[in-house]
Image (tube, grey):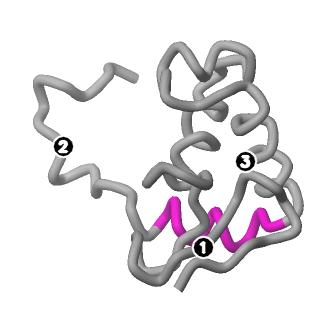
Amino acid sequence: MLLKTEHCYIVTDDQILSGEPIVKGTRTPVRAVVEIWRQGILPEEIPVHLPHLTLAQVFDALSYYSDYQAEINTYIERNRIPDELIDPLVKTSE
């Protein structure tokens, strides 16, 4: 069932990603926008990486994150690929 939030572009749907907050009209989770932003990509540049999103959707996703950081951080951690599963050829050198 589709549930609206107080953020106009963010919804939850228990049929999509088990109810994780997504950008309305897409299957893109808020965490995807947040993870790109955390990599140092400016919000204005995120639609280059996720061209199906508008700048308004990006800013609303980041606003949602600001209001619900603990929730989104839980989704990020839950979906993180463990280091031991990352192929050594694609790991960045530290």
Looking at the image, tell me whether mark 1 or mark 2 is earlier in sequence order: 1
Q: Find out whether residue 88 is within the magenta segment.
A: no
* Mark sitting on residue 61: 3
Q: Which residue is mark 2?
A: 86
Residue at position x 70%, y 35% from top? 58
Q: How far across and down, in percent of the image, does residue 48 sit?
A: 53, 13
Classify mark 3: residues with Cα within 10 Å, few (<14), some (14-19) or many (20+).
many
**Marks 2 and 3: CB-CB under 8 Å?**
no
Residue at position x 77%, y 55% from top? 65
Chief secondary structure of the magenta span? helix
Residue at position x 53%, y 68% from top? 75
* Of 2 and 70, the residue lying toward us: 2
Residue at position x 41%, y 71% from top? 16
Measure how far apart labels 1 and 2 are at the Cα level: 30 Å
* Mark sitting on residue 12: 1
- Nearer the observer: mark 1 or 3; the answer is 1
- Nearer the observer: mark 2 or 3; the answer is 3
**In the image, 89: left or right of 22?**
left
Q: How far across and down, in percent of the image, does residue 33 sit?
A: 59, 40
Amino acid at circle 1? Thr
